Image (cartoon, rainbow, N blue to C red):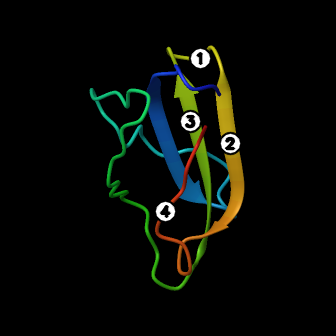
Amino acid sequence: MGGRTVITHVYVSPTESNGWDDDVLGRDVLNPGESVFIYFGRYDPGSCFYDIRVLSNGRAGEGMLRAVNLCDTDTVTFS
């Protein structure tokens, strides 16, 4: 993604899901060097693995992590 990229959308969904939930940033953006604590609606305490997708400037420059174990991880970094 790059050091000057503004993240405009973040999606988090269970790995076994076929789709993405709503953008968890809402109207906010994440500027370079900033961090944010994210709450997301489809958290299932019985499932630990989630896919995380970020978009910059709407769609230009996309990043994705698959099967992130959110039971063992509390920090995810895109750079």
Q: Amino acid at mark 1?
A: Arg
Within-10-Å neighbours for mark 1: few <14, some 14–19, many 20+: few
Q: Quadrant of the N terminus?
A: top right
Residue at the spot of label 1: 59
Q: Identify the image quadrant of residue 45.
A: bottom left
For the residues marked 3 and 1, what is the alpha-carbon distance in whole angstroms?
Answer: 9 Å
Q: Identify the image quadrant of residue 13.
A: bottom right
Of the pair 13 and 2, the residue shown nearer to us: 2
* Secondary structure state at the residue bearing disc 3: strand
Marks 3 & 1, CB-CB < 8 Å contact: no
Whole-percent x, y for residue 28 in the image: 28, 29
Marks 4 & 3, CB-CB < 8 Å contact: no
Q: Amino acid at mark 4?
A: Thr
Query: Looking at the picture, does residue 26 appear above or below residue 36?
Result: above
- In terms of sequence position, does the residue under pointer 2 or pointer 1 come before the other? 1
Q: Quadrant of the C terminus?
A: top right
- Looking at this rendering, what residue extends furthest in the left direction? 27
For the residues marked 3 and 2, what is the alpha-carbon distance in whole angstroms?
Answer: 6 Å
- Point out which mark residue 75 bears: 4
Drawn side of residue 29 relative to residue 64, left or right: left
Residue at (63, 14) in percent of width and height: 60
Marks 3 & 2, CB-CB < 8 Å contact: yes
For the residues marked 4 and 2, what is the alpha-carbon distance in whole angstroms?
Answer: 15 Å
Residue at the spot of label 3: 54
* Secondary structure state at the residue bearing disc 1: loop
Drawn side of residue 78 relative to residue 7, left or right: right
Query: Looking at the picture, does residue 22 appear above or below residue 5?
Result: below
- Point out which mark residue 22 bears: none
| Front tag of 4 and 3 | 4
Marks 4 & 1, CB-CB < 8 Å contact: no
- In terms of sequence position, does the residue under pointer 4 or pointer 3 come before the other? 3
- In terms of sequence position, does the residue under pointer 4 or pointer 1 come before the other? 1
